[in-house]
Image: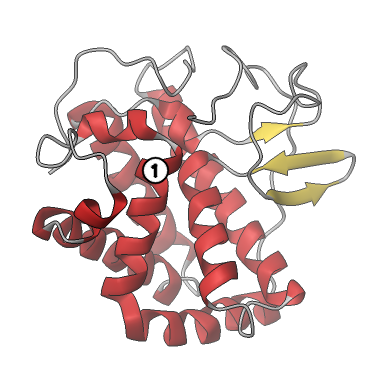
Amino acid sequence: MERTRGEGDGEGDPLERPSPLTDKERLMIQDSWAKVYQSCDDVGVAILVRLFVNFPSSKQFFSQFKDIEEPEELESSGQLRKHARRVMSALNTLVESLGSADKVASVLRLVGKSHALRHKVDPVYFKVHGKQNPHAGDNSYSGPVMCTEGSVSCRADILSGVILEVLGEEFSSLVTPEVGAAWTKFFAMVCRSITAVYEEAGWTKLSTPTERSSSSECV
């Protein structure tokens, strides 16, 4: 059964902006990522398969494999592997650019604009949720907690939550609690930046993952 969030969850949440990464956190992310990226194709496929299994509605943005149901068949899809490589390459660019705030902002803006304006991917896939939202106590989303800023606990967006789950499972000895905390802080920044681009593009409503307006497909 697909995990979903309550409709309108998180709209207007008074979430605080995550604090910048420290030099130590940046190095932990870059060092751990260097090892993860050695298996970029397999890790990327694992991330997308997990996303499509847990959130089947996300497949509707991909004509090449939107009708594939079996995880094994998804894993063997050449088109899925191709897109997984693009996802991992984008993450690699972000991680390698962590020393330059301007470069990171530029990359995230391009990613956000592409998904908002070209592919029209629902922003719920990138939304950060907080405790103040009235549905935060329910079981609508079981993804990992992203970060804690003051009295606010931010939850992962759908995609980042899946990435964190896969990294934690596949690289458990590498992703220690301290390293994991740095990654969650990084993804909180990513989520906020992309959400801001969506807002600039005029997306005013965050629907549930099962809702979708007409859109161009991610290829």
Drawn side of residue 130 relative to residue 75, left or right:
right
Q: Secondary structure at mark 1?
A: helix
The structure residue drawn at horizontal position 14% and vertical position 26%, both measured from the top left corner, is: 216
Give the residue at the far right of this rendering.
151
Drawn side of residue 152 relative to residue 162, left or right:
right
Q: Is residue 178 above or below residue 157?
A: below
Q: Position of residue 200 (x, y in %)?
A: 40, 25
Q: Nearer the viewer, residue 133 or 54?
A: 54
Q: Position of residue 87 (x, y in %)?
A: 29, 58
Q: Nearer the viewer, residue 174 or 70?
A: 70
**Quarter of the figure with residue 19:** bottom right
**Quarter of the figure with residue 34:** bottom left
Q: Which residue is mark 1?
A: 53
Q: Nearer the viewer, residue 11 or 2?
A: 2
Amino acid type at circle 1 is: Val
Question: Counting other residues with Cα less than 10 Å from the Cα at mark 1, is it few (<14), some (14-19), or many (20 or more)?
Answer: some
The structure residue drawn at horizontal position 54% and vertical position 83%, both measured from the top left corner, is: 32
Drawn side of residue 151 relative to residue 178, left or right:
right
Q: Is residue 212 above or below residue 66?
A: above
Q: Is residue 136 above or below residue 111?
A: above
The structure residue drawn at horizontal position 26% and vertical position 56%, both measured from the top left corner, is: 72
The structure residue drawn at horizontal position 10% and vertical position 60%, both measured from the top left corner, is: 78
How many marks on residues? 1
Q: Nearer the viewer, residue 19 or 127?
A: 127
Q: Position of residue 131 (x, y in %)?
A: 80, 30
